[in-house]
Amino acid sequence: MTATAQIPGYVAGTWDIDPAHSNVEFSVRHMGVAKSRGRFGSFRGEIVTAADPLESTVTATIEAASIDTRQADRDAHLRSADFLDVEQFPTLTFRSTGVRQDGDDFVIDGEFTLRGVTKPVSLATELGGFTENGLLGLSASVTINRTDFGVGPAGSAKVSEKVKITLDIEAQRRD
């Protein structure tokens, strides 16, 4: 049985991520006791679902300056050279390098670039499905070490080095 036969309603095609119906969020432990959360408000991307789902690809770009933690002073600090350095590195990017099945779910392997540093990452991905009117939904998550990308001070007691990135994506099929 092929992977396609195991995905009810699977549709091969090219899909554009719809930012109005998608979320790119993150959480990081603050002061070792609580999680601080935020989101990026401006992003775009393309998903190509191949005839064989394991041949599918994803590319995405996030505007670093669109970071929003609901606290203006913190957002300004995160945009500064101390963290994202949005003046020098205006985007974060992801490009898939492979897709593999993990039980009923998938893992999307790829290259994530943040602050000009590119590292391999693997996104645990749950396919939400496809609709008859041309929508694709999926959820994915990955935990990165921010200092691997030169973000913020290493060994800080204030902010954990581990950052969880969570994606809830709805994409529209191109005609």
Image: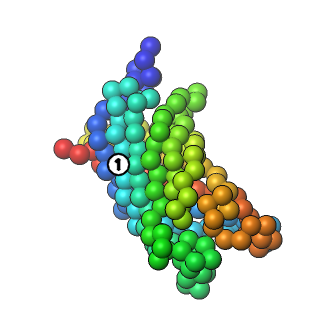
Q: Determine the secondary structure under disc 1.
A: strand
Of the pair 50 and 175, the residue shown nearer to us = 50
* Total numbered circles: 1
> In this rendering, is residue 82 above or below 44?
below
Task: Name the amino acid type tagged 1.
Answer: Glu
- In the picture, measured across the screen, residue 77 lies left or right of residue 108, that is right
Any part of residue 61 in sight: yes
Residue 136 coordinates in the image, percent (x, y):
36, 43
Residue at point 64%, 54% (across, down): 144
Residue farthest along the left direction in this orientation: 175
Residue at point 58%, 27% (across, down): 103
Which residue is label 1 attached to? 46
Of the pair 141 and 77, the residue shown nearer to us = 77
- In the picture, measured across the screen, residue 12 lies left or right of residue 26, that is left
> In this rendering, is residue 67 above or below 163?
below
- In the picture, measured across the screen, residue 148 lies left or right of residue 124, that is right
Residue 154 coordinates in the image, percent (x, y):
74, 67
